[in-house]
């Protein structure tokens, strides 16, 4: 029998599911501005947005993976591994190619190719081999983390000093005063939003996450859709690494630790359903900003013991999700 | 065992501003089987939920042995002996039969579970129901009919004196239904008050003592079953004459073979079946559940691994996936609309275009075109939804089925296989769907209809293939299409008594 | 568990040799945390080097080295060593004090020699030998350098490590050393001994404070993040950054006279080598080695930097 409550269409402006994350972000911005005058300065905003870019770019990819009913725990380790690989290759080719943009391009290519490959490995094991995504990516998480520790011999891989000066502008410079990580993050987010809402791939990902049997019976190639979500995520991890390496010019076993959880948290705060079937990229962007703003505000104020940073972050994550909880779910 | 009678007296129920039940009065007496019938959306489920404590009445009263009661929730109703068995089984698939029967009411000895006692009691209950399933079997491994029995055993273990069953036979074969009816008779003899709903009016006629007919949330007719014919029941439900359920076949079948299947096998289910389908033809496929009907067709469209050769319009095609089948103009419409046909938590637009999304995509999805398609589908297939944005899971079964047909037809197939076109759908909508199928045939589409309902296959099809144990056991057409002949073929006897001898 | 040198020879020798000889072949177990950050990486390197060298020096000793990624695994490692290798001595750098205390006590009660490195156990007196760095001394040396570098006082920000006893002792030592000097700590946050975290924290310090005279990064990994953030801001008010531990890149910058990195304070990961060596001495000779052995923190300046530069170490 049809339930009749569906007849009342909620006003989107009053819908907490839409409004929740935005509201949380606005509150944070107001709190930040009240606590410290420099909060809204151009420099601080640039800092926060640039440092959000790594997790942000990855989280956009993660939105698709989760929407299609998957999960990827390996992205943090994958980023560390790709960063290590990128540095090793550039250092190795430096005597041959000399310092310069061609070598930077090679480094970028390495990152993208490695990301694509890593995504394909995850996707292959999950789709073709039919192993749970949680287990596959838990496994690859450990593998990439060990590989980077091994590549670095337990220490830190550092980019040759001469190359560092050339590659540095990728993180610190930009156009019209907007730094490259922000520009790339914005482009990735806009494209992601468009693909999720308006492209067949986004619709198919949501259908697969919602009910893969229905998708299969509707002539959707379920395995290919799943595979592509992991490959796109891998590519985006590569892109994030391209932004990351220029910042400190190094990679170690502590690079990218817990990025996977931050990315997943951002996706969920943004209103994507963890069990799949529904995703929104703009929400993810807001989730990422909320997470980095909390850190930023806590650093800019003295009121709270730094021991409690994690607790405050936890409370805000839970609140953001409570705000958008589906009330009908109880029935 | 003491007995109970349960009554609703002048019960109304509203959701928000909308009243969906109006002044319902109904009494379930001990030792009586009461049938509650009505079209989808008539208010049957809400009525049952109010009886069993899942919902409260907005006004009116629930009476137990003439004393007014207010159930706070279903647990409270169960504690008093009123149990509802849902249409979709409420069983934990991974748990054993015994664990399911005692779920939430486990017997304990000290801190530990008294598994021996529970298994013994489960066995006793199942024996009482004449059900051979082992208490230690996992629920996911047992047949649907056994699941129904486990549900009933679960109800009995809670000392049910009023048993309410929502479409208990919807997922059962006729043989399984027979077993269920025997148990209903026994429970009735033991003084249990029973209420059930069903769309199968022959069943209602056979096993119920009393009937209440609902239409649009109100009781339109109530009385002893003996006073009704099946036609009268249907008329009361629909509110108009439905004696001519099947439209008159007025289309000439073309002579061109559009689909030719040779030696189709699906490992484990189907062996070596061959048939031809003509332009504009409606081909019925009948057979018992488990005879491989669905598996054969799922194999044909690439949903299962299969072997054999297929020609469409004379050209050989290799079909490995539903997408390839669709590209060749062949689509399959699943029997399981809820878990394989539609995305219940998505809107109508997303569902409608899912199968033909490339048609609406040119880099980006053309949402205006999608909206136009939805408008047309709503008109063409008379889909009645409270709003365009409604989640498909909130549509009634009939409207879901119409949407599913619209979705598959939007993909533009020339050949469409419809598996169980009217399962769990009320009689008024059934009539509409039969009309759609005829209209498709008139438009030159070739159609295969799989159905467990003998009458449906006979009423719709030009020709019927009967399957048994994964093979085609015979074919009937024209005047030979009778229930008797089809059943004999399905059971492995000759088409006529003479042939069998 | 990563057993290096699973010496089949030792088992063979034990089964064939005479009782007196068998008594002489002793096994030393070394249990340390895995190389999850720079300092630990250096510590792993020095442990492996020491084991390799000592096996040649002392043919009658066998070593078994295990690295653990969490306290629970370290407990398992130690139990395995006792059960399967019958160790005569255990050198352990506890992942955390509390969870390791009773397993290590069990080893000591079984009669084996126990050397504890760097992080003390929760109950004192279990170990025969305690080799440690001097965390409060580390803070004190750092603070004294700050005072000498800024005789007129000034405003500094400080970055702390992962919240632990080690970190608390260092900070307390530092604060005590600068007390009354006119140096004011205007901001203190956890950078978790991590480059990325310290970069972020320093960016925010730079937004928050108009004038910062110097930074106590308290760790070389964190110093690298801090230096990158300062470079990005283009600010010239910060005179120098003081790290710590003795990472070879930072030692090289001190040696080469980098203005922003004028000094470093050691907290040598090679203390594990000291501990293994002393344990070997204790097992093979009559020289007294039990008690406490503290490795002081030394100020590295351009004059003495070359002594602290280990080109082969990963740290």
Image (tube, coloured by chain):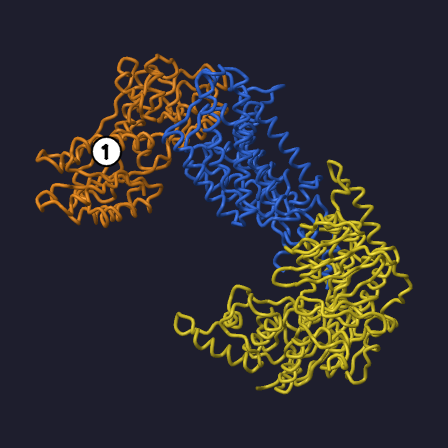
Please give left or right for residue C291 compared with residue A277 in the image.
Answer: left
Depicted B227 relative to depicted C27: above or below: below
Chain coloured yellow here: B
Label 1: element kind:
helix
Instruction: Tell me where residue B383 appears, x and y as whole percent.
Output: 81, 57
Instruction: Tell me where residue C138 appears, x and y as whole percent.
Output: 28, 27
Depicted C131 relative to depicted B199: above or below: above
Residue position for label 1: C51
Q: Chain of mark 1?
A: C
Depicted C257 relative to depicted B268: above or below: above
Instruction: Tell which of B131 and B190 is nearer to you.
Output: B131
Q: Disc count in the image?
A: 1
Chain coloured blue here: A
Q: Quadrant of the C terminus of chain A?
A: bottom right
Q: Residue at x 72, y 61 (%)?
A: A3
Mark 1 crowd level (few <14, some 14–19, many ≥20, 10 Å Cα): many
Instruction: Tell me where residue B373 appears, x and y as whole percent.
Output: 81, 47
| Colour chosen for chain C | orange
């Amino acid at each position: 029998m049809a339930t009749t409550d569906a007849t009342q269409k909620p006003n989107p402006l009053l819908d907490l599911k839409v409004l929740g994350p935005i509201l949380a972000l606005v509150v944070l911005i107001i709190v930040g501005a009240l606590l410290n005058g420099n909060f809204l300065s151009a420099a601080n905003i640039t800092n926060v947005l640039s440092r959000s870019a790594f997790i942000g770019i990855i989280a956009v990819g993660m939105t698709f993976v989760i929407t299609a009913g998957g999960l990827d725990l390996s992205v943090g380790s994958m980023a560390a591994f790709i960063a290590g690989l990128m540095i090793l290759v550039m250092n190795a080719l430096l005597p041959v190619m000399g310092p310069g943009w061609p070598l930077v391009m090679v480094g970028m290519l390495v990152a993208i190719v490695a990301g694509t490959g890593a995504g394909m490995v995850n996707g292959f094991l999950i789709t073709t081999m039919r192993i749970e995504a949680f287990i596959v990516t838990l496994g690859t998480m450990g593998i990439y983390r060990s590989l980077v520790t091994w590549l670095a011999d337990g220490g830190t891989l550092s980019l040759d000093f001469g190359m560092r000066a050339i590659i540095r502008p990728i993180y610190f410079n930009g156009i019209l005063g907007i730094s490259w990580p922000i520009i790339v993050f914005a482009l990735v987010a806009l494209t992601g939003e468009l693909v999720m809402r308006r492209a067949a791939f986004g619709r198919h990902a949501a259908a697969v996450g919602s009910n893969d049997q229905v998708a299969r019976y509707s002539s959707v190639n379920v395995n290919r859709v799943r595979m592509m979500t992991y490959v796109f995520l891998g590519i985006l991890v590569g892109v994030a690494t391209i932004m990351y390496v220029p910042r400190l010019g190094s990679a170690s076993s502590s690079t990218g630790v817990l990025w996977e959880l931050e990315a997943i948290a951002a996706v969920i705060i943004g209103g994507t359903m963890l069990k799949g079937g529904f995703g929104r990229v703009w929400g993810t962007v807001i989730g990422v900003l909320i997470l980095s703003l909390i850190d930023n505000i806590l650093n800019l104020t003295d009121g709270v013991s730094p021991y409690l940073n994690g607790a405050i972050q936890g409370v805000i994550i839970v609140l953001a999700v409570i705000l958008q909880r589906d009330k009908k779910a109880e029935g | 065992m003491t007995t109970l009678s349960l009554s609703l007296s002048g019960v109304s129920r509203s959701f928000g501003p909308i009243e969906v039940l109006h002044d319902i009065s109904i009494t379930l007496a001990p030792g009586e089987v009461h049938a509650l019938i009505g079209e989808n959306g008539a208010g049957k489920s809400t009525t049952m939920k109010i009886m069993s404590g899942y919902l409260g009445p907005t006004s009116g009263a629930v009476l137990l042995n003439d004393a007014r009661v207010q159930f706070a929730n279903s647990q409270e109703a169960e504690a008093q002996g009123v149990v509802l068995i849902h249409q979709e089984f409420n069983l934990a698939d991974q748990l054993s039969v015994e664990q399911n029967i005692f779920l939430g009411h486990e017997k304990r000895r000290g801190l530990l579970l008294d598994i021996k006692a529970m298994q013994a009691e489960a066995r006793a209950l199942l024996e009482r129901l004449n059900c051979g399933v082992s208490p230690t079997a996992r629920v996911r491994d047992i047949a649907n009919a056994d699941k129904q029995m486990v549900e009933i055993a679960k109800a009995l273990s809670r000392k049910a004196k009023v048993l309410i069953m929502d479409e208990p036979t919807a997922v059962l074969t006729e043989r399984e239904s027979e077993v269920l009816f025997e148990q209903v008779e026994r429970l009735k003899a033991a003084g249990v008050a029973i209420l059930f709903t069903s769309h199968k009016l022959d069943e209602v006629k056979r096993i119920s003592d009393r009937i209440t007919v609902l239409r649009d949330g109100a009781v339109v007719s109530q009385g002893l079953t003996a006073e009704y014919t099946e036609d009268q029941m249907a008329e009361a439900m629909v509110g108009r004459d439905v004696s001519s359920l099947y439209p008159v076949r007025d289309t000439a079948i073309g002579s061109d073979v559009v689909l030719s299947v040779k030696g189709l096998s699906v490992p484990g289910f189907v062996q070596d079946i061959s048939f031809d389908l003509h332009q504009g033809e409606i081909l019925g496929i009948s057979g018992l559940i488990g005879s491989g009907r669905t598996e054969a067709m799922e194999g044909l469209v690439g949903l299962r691994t299969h072997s054999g050769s297929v020609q469409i319009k004379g050209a050989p095609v290799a079909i490995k996936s539903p997408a390839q089948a669709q590209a060749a103009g062949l689509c399959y419409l699943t029997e399981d609309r809820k878990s394989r046909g539609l995305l219940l938590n998505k809107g109508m637009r997303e569902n409608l275009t899912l199968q033909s999304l490339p048609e609406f995509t040119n880099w980006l999805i053309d949402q205006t075109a999608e909206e136009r398609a939805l408008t047309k589908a709503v008109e063409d297939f008379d889909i009645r939804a409270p709003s365009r944005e409604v989640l498909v899971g909130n549509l009634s079964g009939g409207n879901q089925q119409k949407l599913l047909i619209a979705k598959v037809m939007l993909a533009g197939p020339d050949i469409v296989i419809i598996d169980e076109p009217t399962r769990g759908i009320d009689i008024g909508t059934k009539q509409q769907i039969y009309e759609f199928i005829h209209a498709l045939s008139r438009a030159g589409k070739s159609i295969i209809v799989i159905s467990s309902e003998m009458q449906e296959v006979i009423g719709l099809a030009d020709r019927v293939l009967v399957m048994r144990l994964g093979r085609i056991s015979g074919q009937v057409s024209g005047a030979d299409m009778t229930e008797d002949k089809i059943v004999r073929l399905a059971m492995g006897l000759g088409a006529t008594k003479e042939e069998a001898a | 568990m990563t057993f290096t040198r699973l010496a089949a020879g030792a088992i063979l020798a034990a089964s064939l040799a005479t009782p007196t000889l068998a008594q002489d072949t002793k096994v030393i177990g070394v249990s340390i945390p895995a190389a999850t950050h720079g300092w630990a990486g250096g510590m792993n390197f020095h442990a492996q080097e020491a084991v390799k060298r000592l096996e040649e020096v002392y043919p009658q000793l066998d070593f078994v080295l295990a690295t653990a990624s969490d306290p629970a695994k370290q407990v398992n490692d130690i139990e395995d060593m006792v059960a399967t290798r019958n160790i005569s001595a255990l050198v352990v750098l506890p992942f955390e004090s509390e969870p390791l205390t009773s397993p290590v006590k069990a080893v000591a009660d079984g009669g084996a020699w126990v050397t504890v490195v760097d992080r003390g156990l929760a109950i004192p007196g279990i170990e025969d030998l305690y080799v440690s760095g001097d965390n409060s001394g580390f803070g004190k040396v750092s603070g004294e350098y700050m005072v000498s570098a800024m005789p007129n006082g000034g405003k500094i920000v400080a970055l702390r490590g992962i919240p632990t006893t080690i970190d608390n002792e260092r900070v307390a030592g530092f604060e005590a050393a600068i007390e009354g000097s006119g140096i004011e700590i205007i901001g203190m946050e956890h950078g978790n001994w991590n480059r990325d975290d310290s970069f972020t924290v320093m960016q925010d310090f730079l937004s928050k404070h108009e004038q910062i005279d110097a930074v106590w990064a308290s760790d070389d990994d964190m110093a690298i993040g801090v230096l990158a953030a300062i470079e990005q801001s283009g600010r010239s008010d910060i005179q120098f950054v003081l790290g710590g531990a003795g990472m070879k890149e930072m030692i090289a910058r001190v040696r080469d006279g980098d203005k922003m990195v004028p000094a470093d304070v050691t907290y040598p990961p090679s203390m594990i080598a000291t501990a293994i060596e002393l344990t070997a001495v204790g097992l093979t000779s009559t020289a007294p080695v039990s008690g406490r052995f503290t490795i002081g923190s030394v100020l590295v300046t351009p004059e003495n930097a070359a002594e602290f530069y280990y080109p082969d170490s990963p740290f």
